[in-house]
Image (cartoon, helix red, strand yellow):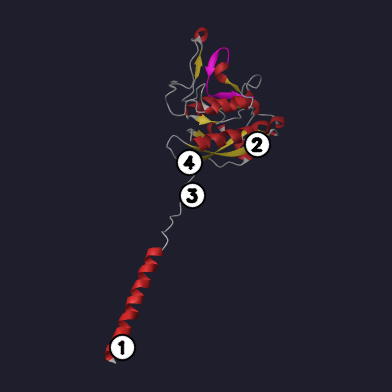
């Protein structure tokens, strides 16, 4: 009788071990959940703050909107910025920045120029991308928010031979198509701007304004 009990007990133990091993072999691998990428916020203005102290008449201010864009900066990290721009091109710029984001084309920063007291030279030195600035109102598309400047340090204004007495801008910037963030004829970003009807400043008569697009 004792032998029979031991045999039954041994059978039960073997069965439990076999079941445990089967559970182990059929256990699903642990799925690692990817955390969302951290976003560095470069600016967070309200429309009123982005327009503070502008000399633009109310009729022009009424044409403007403030849009949020995402891009990878020169540090390789995801950033969030804002464009103060004309409502007429806001959809175009959203789509273009979607391509900029997806392709990881580096943009240093996108901040309304109010941060630089409406001074284009200071904005360029900071390698800032922006759209609206009420300046040179008689001929500049920036005065109505119908233009945008991208990465001016990588894409400086360079004067053509007949106008070399003028200084290139921004100061110290050098155009090198091999540098990250530089625009060329073959750049997908340039082609997309053209597809949407923008004029590229490289084709101005007096200078190569590679960072400038207008409509």
Q: In percent of the image, x 48 and y 49: which residue is there? A: 36
Q: Secondary structure at mark 3?
A: loop
76 horizontally vs 143: left or right: left
2 or 1: mark nearer the eye: 1
Instruction: Tell me residue 20's x, y (percent).
Output: 36, 71
What residue would you read off at disc 4? 78
3 or 1: mark nearer the eye: 1
Instruction: Tell me residue 189's x, y (percent).
Output: 54, 28
Q: Earlier in the sequence, mark 4 or mark 2?
A: 2
Residue 8, compared with residue 171, is above or below; it is below
Q: Secondary structure at mark 4?
A: strand
What residue would you read off at disc 1? 5
Q: Earlier in the sequence, mark 2 or mark 1?
A: 1
Q: Residues within 10 Å of mark 2 (few under 14, many from 20)?
A: some
Looking at the rendering, the stretch of residues picked out in magenta corresponds to 204-215
84 horizontally vs 154: left or right: right
Given the current orientation, which residue lies at the most extreme top position? 162
4 or 2: mark nearer the eye: 4
Q: Residues within 10 Å of mark 1 (few under 14, many from 20)?
A: few
Distance (Cα) linking label 2 and label 1: 85 Å
Q: Secondary structure at mark 1?
A: helix
Distance (Cα) linking label 3 and label 4: 11 Å
Q: Is residue 112 magenta?
A: no
Given the current orientation, which residue lies at the most extreme bottom position? 1
Instruction: Tell me residue 157's x, y (percent).
Output: 51, 19
Q: In percent of the image, x 51 and y 11: which residue is there? A: 160
Given the current orientation, which residue lies at the most extreme right position? 59
What residue would you read off at disc 2? 65
Q: In percent of the image, x 39 and y 68: which residue is there? A: 23
């Amino acid at each position: 009788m004792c032998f029979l009990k031991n045999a039954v007990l041994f059978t039960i133990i073997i069965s439990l071990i076999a079941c445990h091993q089967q559970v182990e072999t059929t256990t699903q691998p642990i799925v690692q959940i990817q955390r969302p990428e951290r976003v560095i916020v470069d600016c967070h203005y309200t429309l009123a703050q982005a327009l503070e102290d502008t000399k633009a008449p109310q009729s022009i201010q009424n044409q403007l909107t403030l849009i949020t864009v995402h891009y990878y900066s020169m540090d390789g990290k995801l950033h969030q910025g804002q464009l103060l721009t004309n409502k007429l091109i806001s959809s175009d710029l959203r789509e273009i920045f979607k391509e900029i984001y997806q392709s990881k084309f580096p943009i240093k920063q996108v901040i309304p120029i109010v941060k630089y007291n409406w001074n284009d030279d200071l904005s360029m030195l900071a390698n800032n991308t922006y759209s609206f600035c009420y300046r040179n109102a008689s001929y500049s598309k920036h005065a109505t928010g119908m233009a945008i400047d991208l990465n001016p340090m990588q894409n400086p204004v360079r004067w053509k031979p007949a106008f070399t007495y003028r200084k290139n801008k921004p100061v110290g910037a050098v155009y090198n198509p091999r540098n990250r963030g530089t625009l060329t004829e073959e750049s997908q970003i340039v082609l997309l701007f053209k597809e949407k009807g923008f004029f590229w400043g490289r084709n101005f008569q007096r200078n190569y304004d590679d960072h400038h697009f207008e409509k």
